[in-house]
Image (spheres, helix red, strand yellow):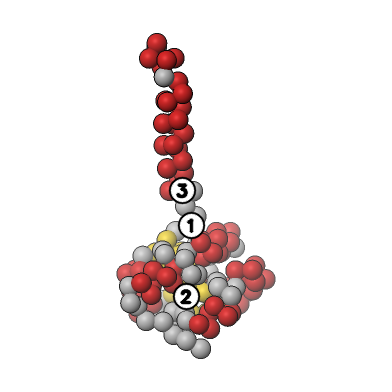
């Protein structure tokens, strides 16, 4: 007991830093799909690729056969993709941040198979995988 009392500040600091290190992994939003899994799903044609970036970002480069609906417009345009509620929807953005938010929104709207591309388009291009341009 004396040890804890004498070292309360270092122990508190160690506990706080441990929680801070674990917090990002505990707060992950939605499901993620790896580059390999995404490539397989795209090749099988069994999923919708939903690019949630702005139209100007989409025009610069995107995954082939992807549909562009900006994250800010997604709540109003859910009806456009309603037929994919029972299929896999892979949300894509530049780094994976916006697509994670889109997945949370899609799951709340009943898209049970929604997931986010892990690492986003940056990871996709980093692996030398192809992109399409308008």
Q: Which mark is residue 20?
A: none
The answer to whether the residue labelled 3 contacts the one labelled 1, judged by CB atoms less than 8 Å apart, is no
Q: Residue at x 45, y 20 (%)?
A: 8
| On-image quarter of the N terminus | top left
Q: Residue at x 55, y 73 (%)?
A: 53
Other-residue count near label 1 (Cα within 10 Å), few / some / many at <14 / 14–19 / ≥20:
some
Q: Quadrant of residue 72?
A: bottom right
Residue matched to label 1: 30
Other-residue count near label 3 (Cα within 10 Å), few / some / many at <14 / 14–19 / ≥20:
few
Above-or-below relation of 126 to 97: below
Dot 1 lies on which element? Answer: loop
Above-or-below relation of 20 to 118: above
Q: Is residue 113 visible?
A: no
Mark 2 → mark 1, Cα distance in angstroms:
16 Å
Q: Which mark is residue 24?
A: 3
Q: Residue at x 47, y 75 (%)?
A: 49
Above-or-below relation of 27 to 68: above
Q: Position of residue 39 (x, y in %)?
A: 35, 74
Q: Is residue 12 visible?
A: yes
Seen in the image, is 46 located left or right of residue 127?
right
Which is more N-terminal, label 1 or label 3?
A: 3
Residue toward you, 129 or 43: 129
The answer to whether the residue labelled 3 contacts the one labelled 2, judged by CB atoms less than 8 Å apart, is no
Which is more N-terminal, label 2 or label 3?
A: 3
Q: Position of residue 15 (x, y in %)?
A: 43, 31
Other-residue count near label 2 (Cα within 10 Å), few / some / many at <14 / 14–19 / ≥20:
many
Residue matched to label 2: 49
Residue toward you, 95 or 7: 7
Total label count? 3
Determine the residue located farthest toward the top in the rendered image: 2
């Amino acid at each position: 007991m004396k040890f804890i009392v004498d070292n309360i500040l270092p122990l508190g600091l160690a506990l706080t830093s441990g929680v801070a290190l674990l917090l990002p992994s505990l707060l992950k939003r939605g499901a993620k799909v790896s580059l390999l899994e995404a490539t397989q799903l795209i090749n099988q044609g069994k999923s919708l690729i939903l690019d949630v970036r702005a139209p100007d970002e989409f025009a610069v480069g995107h995954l082939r056969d992807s549909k562009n609906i900006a994250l800010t417009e997604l709540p109003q345009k859910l009806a456009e993709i309603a037929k994919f509620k029972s299929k896999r929807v892979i949300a894509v953005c530049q780094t994976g941040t916006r697509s994670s938010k889109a997945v949370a929104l899609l799951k709340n709207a009943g898209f049970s198979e929604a997931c986010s591309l892990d690492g986003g388009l940056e990871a996709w291009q980093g692996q030398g995988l192809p992109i399409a341009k308008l």
